[in-house]
Image: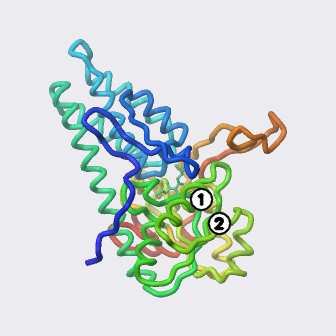
Amino acid sequence: MMASQSFLRCIELTASSVRLLDQTQLPSREVWLEITDWRDMIEAICFLRIRGAPALGVAAAAYAWLASLRLTPEDDFKSAISSALDIIAASRPTAVNLHHVVAGCRIIVNSVSSIEKAVAALRRYTIELSNYEIDACRRMGEHGLAHIGAGSHRILTICNTGSLATVGIGTALGVVRTLAAHGAVKVFACETRPLLQGARLTMWELMRDGINCALITDGMAASVMRSEGIDLVLAGADRIACNGDTANKIGTLGLAILARHYGIPFYIVAPRSSIDTALATGEGIVIEQRDGDEVRGFGGCAGAPCGCEVRNPAFDVTPAALISAIITDEGAFVAPYNL
Ligand code: MRU
């Protein structure tokens, strides 16, 4: 049994609000928001103040609880919460955790007979889900360590898969943290254009933990894999189909192709809650398309001519054939995947 690791809780419930760390302000400022209105949760989710598939699941449950708190005896509470759930379901289409939670909330609300019971049940659900994700992160770390082995590792990663993306030690970063507790680890973090989750968030988390790390631009990945002697690539997941095809942050597919070229193991790390058992393959995964201005500039500064044509898919799908193993909270799975 491994010693428990401490971690930052990016989202939690107070008696009457949802407290979350505004990730758009990192790394410059640590701003905690206290959200009492469910509509502000939608804004926080759409603008990535809270993000990462497991954390989005918890945010969706917290949102349903906040929506239920606002109800009055005159409201038809089942249809009011159902309408609120329709809105959040449209906010981030790819991260399946959010959609699992929306379905879970619908079942809960349909099974209770009063507003008070809905409020209590949705609060309990949010807390239980947080506890599940915390434990799942710890288990992924243990399974990752068992599969990869202790020792010295030079790791490439993308996006942010740490405490800021989950409510525990993280998925891919949870494995990094666990490996770092058992050996010498050096992490290369891709900056992750356009919203820089790797540069802003992963580097912030790793430096806070004193884990040896270096930031690279996304375009450096190929040469860094060779010149820096990368041993493995660790990435998270937003939705995994039964055959192992995996949607994750845009750029992940490119890393998987490069890793195959260089013969470097490429691992996906994700909890069971990120698996979509209704999807046979990755073909059916809906990819979130975000506003083109995210690509045209950053932080209010233009990086391209105003109004130029751009593409901004937030995720890509890595075929199972390029994945060496999928490390989950229930163990490490290898091909052929039958999740
Ligand atoms: O758009 P984001 O920042 O929500 O995307 C997050 C990712 O793609 C992560 O890599 C993924 O959710 C795994 S997080 C544990």
What is the x, y in percent for residue 178?
Answer: 41, 74
Q: Position of residue 187 (x, y in %)?
A: 57, 73
Label 2, residues with CA under 10 Å away: few <14, some 14-19, many ≥20: some
Q: CA distance from mark 1 to mark 2?
A: 8 Å
User: Which mark identifies residue 167?
Assistant: none
Q: Quadrant of residue 331?
A: bottom left
Q: Residue at x 42, y 67 (%)?
A: 174
Is the Cβ of the residue at disc 1 closer than 8 Å to that at disc 2? yes
Total residue callouts: 2
> Which residue: 41% across, 50% down?
10
Tell me which amino acid carries mark 1: Gly
Q: Amino acid at mark 2?
A: Leu
Could you tell me which quadrant the N terminus lies in?
A: bottom left
Q: Is residue 126 above or below residue 243?
A: above
Q: Is residue 184 left or right of residue 67?
A: right
Q: Which residue is mark 1?
A: 198
Identify the image's colour scheme: rainbow, by chain, secondary structure or one colour. Answer: rainbow
Which residue matches tag 2? 215
